[in-house]
Image (cartoon, rainbow, N blue to C red):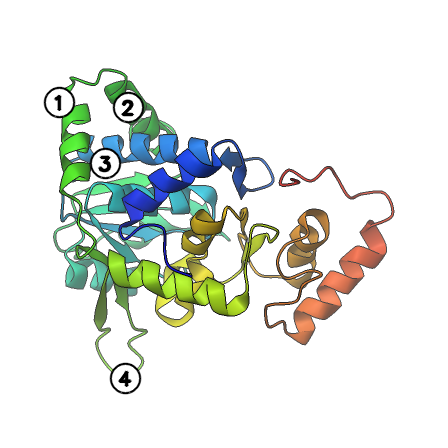
């Protein structure tokens, strides 16, 4: 199977035009269709440009799996930026090192996750060229909601400077542009940044989906942390294959057997019924316990049902 696009922005536009109102991202409280995705990507792209992003800017994400992660990643690509991913298990010194090495100018981060205040970890650290930090759940101008709202307002006038800048950046996008910088763990020395282009990424994911036989009857449960894609890139970035084949994706916030059991049972993900993933005994025990204890009367309506 060949990829329907050679650049990520082109893929997002293709999916919106082809699959429209079909559901793409499914979380407990958030459902976005393919058309919704394109809108949110463009609003986020405009918001990033308002914060100083341009074609070639390095935008880092330090957050767990959630719908905003996918939107920001695609928005960065939409305007020709380069994505830099950070592992949520990093401490401040480790994250700052990646920010310095990558030359990231903008950071999108979680506020508090599993008891850790991520922005506070960077206090006093040398973060290199970093000039802007957006916190996903923060109220006020430094929050992601404000960035999204500002971008939406800017695009409401096609002649606004920001709208024109988005259009110009999108028009300049090339399949051979730098897409991502993925850093190794650094266990044997300084982390090394591996650079990939849009063309090679989309070709890789088209092959990945073809080999696994994924199609539009599947749901794609994203368990692997999106921030450590140098070791789990195909399954971590499943949104690319899903955009090609209109498969809903289910970002999983954290890994626990009983938590994973919920989307598998409720939404018939690709890992349920048609087994295509590796699962540990921990998953099997947790999911089985969840299904046994809860399935009788606590399985809600499926937000990603066809």
**Crowding at mark 4 (Cα within 10 Å: few <14, some 14-19, many 20+):** few
**Crowding at mark 2 (Cα within 10 Å: few <14, some 14-19, many 20+):** some
Tag of residue 118: none
Tag 4, which secondary structure?
Answer: loop
- C-beta proximity under 8 Å, tags 2 and 4: no
Report the side of 195 relative to 272 (left or right): left
**Crowding at mark 1 (Cα within 10 Å: few <14, some 14-19, many 20+):** some
> Residue beneath label 4, please?
188
Task: Please report whichever mark, 1 or 2, sits nearer to the chain's N-terminal start.
Answer: 2
Q: The N terminus is located in which quarter?
A: bottom left
**Crowding at mark 3 (Cα within 10 Å: few <14, some 14-19, many 20+):** many
Mark 2 and mark 4: Cα distance apart in space: 43 Å
Q: In this rendering, does residue 89 appear at all?
A: no
In which image quadrant can residue 161 be found? Answer: top left
Mark 1 and mark 2: Cα distance apart in space: 13 Å
Tag nearer the camera, 1 or 2:
1
Task: Please report whichever mark, 3 or 2, sits nearer to the chain's N-terminal start.
Answer: 3
Tag 3, which secondary structure?
Answer: helix
Mark 1 and mark 4: Cα distance apart in space: 46 Å
Mark 3 and mark 4: Cα distance apart in space: 35 Å
Report the side of 15 relative to 193 (left or right): right
Tag of residue 48: 3
> Residue beneath label 2, please?
150
In which image quadrant can residue 227 be found? Answer: bottom left
Task: Please report whichever mark, 1 or 4, sits nearer to the chain's N-terminal start.
Answer: 1
What x and y, as percent, mark residue 138?
38, 34
Name the residue rendered at 60%, 40% in the picture. 28
Q: In this rendering, does residue 18 appear at all?
A: yes
Front in this rendered view, residue 67 or 104: 67
Name the residue rendered at 39%, 72% in the picture. 231
Tag nearer the camera, 1 or 4:
1
What x and y, as percent, mark residue 265?
72, 53
């Amino acid at each position: 199977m060949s990829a329907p696009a050679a650049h990520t922005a082109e893929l997002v536009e293709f999916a919106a035009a082809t699959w429209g109102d079909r559901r793409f991202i499914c979380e407990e409280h958030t459902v976005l269709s393919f058309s919704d995705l394109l809108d949110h990507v463009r609003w986020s792209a405009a918001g990033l440009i308002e914060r100083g992003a341009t074609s070639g800017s390095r935008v880092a994400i330090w957050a767990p799996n959630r719908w905003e992660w996918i939107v920001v990643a695609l928005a960065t690509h939409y305007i020709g930026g380069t994505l830099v991913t950070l592992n949520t298990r990093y401490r401040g010194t480790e994250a700052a090192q990646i920010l310095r090495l990558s030359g990231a100018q903008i950071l999108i981060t979680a506020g508090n996750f599993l008891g850790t205040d991520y922005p506070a970890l960077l206090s006093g650290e040398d973060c290199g060229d970093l000039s802007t930090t957006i916190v996903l759940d923060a109220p006020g101008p430094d929050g992601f909601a404000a960035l999204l709202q500002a971008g939406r307002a800017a695009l409401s006038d096609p002649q606004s400077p920001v709208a024109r800048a988005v259009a110009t950046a999108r028009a300049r996008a090339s399949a051979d542009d730098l897409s991502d910088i993925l850093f190794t763990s650094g266990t044997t020395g300084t982390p090394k940044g591996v650079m990939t282009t849009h063309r090679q990424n989309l070709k890789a994911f088209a092959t990945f989906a073809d080999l696994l036989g994924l199609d539009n009857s599947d749901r794609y449960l994203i368990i692997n942390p999106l921030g450590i894609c140098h070791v789990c890139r195909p399954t971590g970035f499943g949104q690319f294959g899903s955009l090609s084949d209109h498969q809903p994706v289910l970002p999983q916030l954290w890994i626990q057997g009983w938590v994973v059991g919920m989307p598998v049972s409720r939404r018939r993900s690709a890992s349920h019924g048609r087994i295509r993933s590796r699962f540990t005994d921990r998953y099997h025990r947790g999911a089985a316990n969840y299904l046994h204890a809860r399935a009788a009367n606590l399985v809600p309506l499926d937000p990603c049902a066809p």
